[in-house]
Image (cartoon, rainbow, N blue to C red):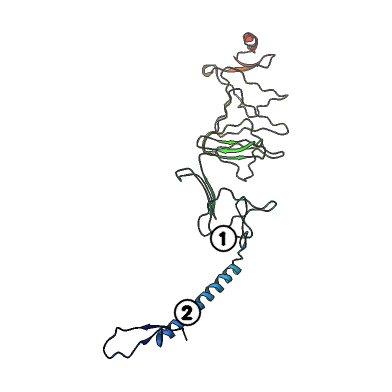
Amino acid sequence: QMPQEQYTHHRSAMPGSEGPQVYKVGIYGWRKRCLYFFVLLLMILILVNLAMTIWILKVMNFTIDGMGNLRITEKGLKLEGDSEFLQPLYAKEIRSRPGNALYFKSARNVTVNILNDQTKVLTQLITGPKAVEAYGKKFEVKTVSGKLLFSADDNEVVVGAERLRVLGAEGTVFPKSIETPNVRADPFKELRLESPTRSLVMEAPKGVEINAEAGNMEATCRTELRLESKDGEIKLDAAKIKLPRLPHGSYTPAGTRQKVFEICVCANGRLFLSQAGTGSTCQINTSVCL
C-alpha cells in the first residue's frame, strides 16, 4: 500500500474536548485501481513505440552513413540500385558510378526541362513512346572534339559532316531549294535528280558541271530540250556526234521553195548556219570562224 500521510490536528480547546484526532490522506478504492491501469497502459505504449522504432530502423536499414541504398557523402547523396521517384526530382547533377551506365525508365515518357530564374521553360526534351521531341531556340550535335555535325534553328539547318548519306529507297524530297557544293551517288549506284510534277533548276554563279566518269549520261524530256548560253558558247567535245533522227527534206517546185540553211563547221569546231544555194555557201560566210 502507498504510504499514508498523517498529521495531527489540534483542535481549539472547547468544552467537552477529548484530545487530538488523526486523519488518513491517500488514494483508495477504484481511483487507485484506475491509476495503476493507466500507468501500466503507458508502459505498454512506450514498449510498443520502442519496438516499432527499432523495427523501422532495422527495415529501412538506417546507419550513420545514410538509409538503405541512400548514402550521405561529402559531395552529396549517393544512391545505389534501382530507384523510383513519385514526385519531381530537383538536382544540380545526376551521374552514375564510374564504369556503369545511367538509365532513365518510365512507363510513359521522360521529360527534361531547363528553367530560368523565373521558372520559365527555356529548353525541353521529351522522350515518349512514339517520338522524341526537343524544344529550344537551337539544336546542335557535336563530336567529342567539338566539331559541329548537325545544327538546326529557325533560319537554317546545317550538316557539318563531310558526307550526308540518304539510304531511303525513295530518296529524299526537298519541298524548296537546296544548296550544296557536290551531289553524287555511292560507287556503282545511280544518281537521279527528279521533279515529278514541276521543273528542276540547277544554278551556280561559277558554272554547273555534270560528269559521268565510268558510264553514260542521259537527258530526256517530253517536249523540248534547250541548251542556251547567253554570253558564252556551247561545246560538244566528242570523237563522234550523231543526230540519227533528223528529218529528211524532199524536192519542191521553185514557186513554193522556202528558205533553207546548211550547217557549216569551222576549223575550231564552231557551228553556224548559211543559206543554202545550188552549191555550198559555207565559204562565203567564213568571217564567222574568225
x, y percent for residue 122:
49, 43
For residue 84, which numbered disc appears in the image?
Answer: 1
As displayed, is residue 208 above or below residue 93? Answer: above
x, y percent for residue 37:
46, 83
Q: Is residue 166 left or right of residue 10?
A: right
* Residue bearing the label numbered 2: 39
Q: Amino acid at mark 1?
A: Glu
Q: Quadrant of residue 81?
A: bottom right
Front-most of 266 and 180?
Answer: 180
x, y percent for residue 56:
57, 69
Report crowding for label 1: few under 14, some 14 to 19, many 20 or more residues within 10 A (C-alpha). few
Front-most of 157 and 175?
Answer: 157
- At horizontal 53% and vertical 54% (from top left) the residue drawn is 89
- At horizontal 68% and vertical 29% (from top left) the residue drawn is 211
Q: Residue furthest left?
A: 15
Q: Is residue 8 left or right of residue 231?
A: left
Q: Amino acid at mark 2?
A: Val
Dot 1 falls on a residue whose secondary structure is loop
